[in-house]
Amino acid sequence: MNNTNRALNRILILVIGLLTLLIGAALVATATVPAVRAGYRDKASTVDGDLTGWFTSTPLFDTGTSWGWILILAVLVLIVVLLLVFVFRQGHGHHDTLVREDTTAAGTTIIGADVAHHAIQHDLDGRPELLASHASTYMVRRTPVLKVSVTCRRGESPWQVAQLIENTLTALDTLLGHQIPALIQISGGFRARLSRRTRLARAARA
């Protein structure tokens, strides 16, 4: 749950993975397969000569430098910039405002996400069924959504843990006067890994 487009994320990972796999396979084949190593030695000098000739035939005015190097440098800078943009977008889905409502013509009511986080964790901390809990808020399609992640003890029923968290969220809705969309993520023991409950909208509680 962050600002990065999921499809773009997966495509980038796929492309980088394939390139890494191909380069690694080529290096291994060159080092271990005699036929590939011999072919590389035969072609290396030809490729080097072709590249040298191309750079020589593309001079940048009278500077003695080929514009090809500038083109390569520009492509590398573009790749670095795109990677930096991708990296800095990661994890920025967190949102610090849970409710924002224009209550009157003269004022707006704003409830910070930390209010909900502290209320949820205060209620869940110390519960014998749970080993750990964490609450956070994300923007999903311009709507603040709570995410409650818990780790339950081995042997605990995921359904009962989900009901426990649901009761906490219902109490929070009553306290705030708003029903907040939420995602419940349960992990822990073997039974917990086999079951996960999601609460995404008002209809999920009907």
Image (cartoon, rainbow, N blue to C red):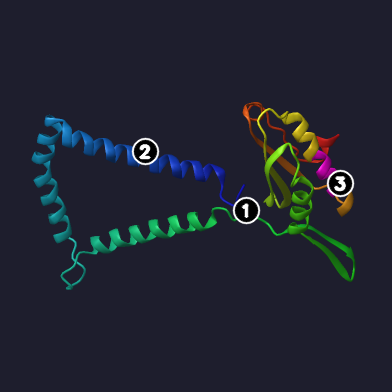
| Total numbered badges shown on the rendered structure | 3
Residues at marks 2 and 3 touching, judged by CB atoms closer than 8 Å:
no
Q: Provide residue 110's location: percent of width, then percent of height.
A: 81, 63
Tell which of 177 and 56 is nearer to you.
177
Q: Provide residue 95's location: percent of width, then percent of height.
A: 68, 57
Instruction: State which quadrant residue 205 falls in.
Output: top right
Dominant secondary structure of the residues highlighted in magenta in the image: helix
Kindly state the secondary structure of the residue where label 3 is placed. Answer: helix
Q: Crowdedness of circle 1 by 10 Å Cα count: few (<14), some, many (20+)?
A: some
Q: Could you tell me the amino acid type at mark 1?
A: Gly
Left of 205 or right of it: where is 192? left
Which label is found at residue 18?
Answer: 2
Q: Provide residue 80's location: percent of width, then percent of height.
A: 39, 58
Q: Residue at x 15, y 33 (%)?
A: 36
Instruction: State which quadrant residue 152 falls in.
Output: top right
Residues at marks 2 and 1 touching, judged by CB atoms closer than 8 Å:
no
User: Which of disc 1 and disc 2 is earlier in sequence?
Assistant: 2
Q: Which residue is mark 1?
A: 93
Q: Could you tell me the amino acid type at mark 2?
A: Leu
Q: What is the C-alpha distance between the residues marked 2 and 3?
A: 49 Å
User: Which of disc 1 and disc 3 is earlier in sequence?
Assistant: 1
Q: Which residue is mark 3?
A: 171
Q: Provide residue 158's location: percent of width, then percent of height.
A: 72, 30
Q: Residue at x 15, y 30 (%)?
A: 33
Q: Find the magenta span and give its range.
A: 166-172
Q: What is the C-alpha distance between the residues marked 2 and 1?
A: 28 Å
Residues at marks 3 and 1 touching, judged by CB atoms closer than 8 Å:
no
Q: Residue at x 24, y 60 (%)?
A: 68
Q: Is residue 48 visible?
A: yes
Q: Could you tell me the amino acid type at mark 3?
A: Ala
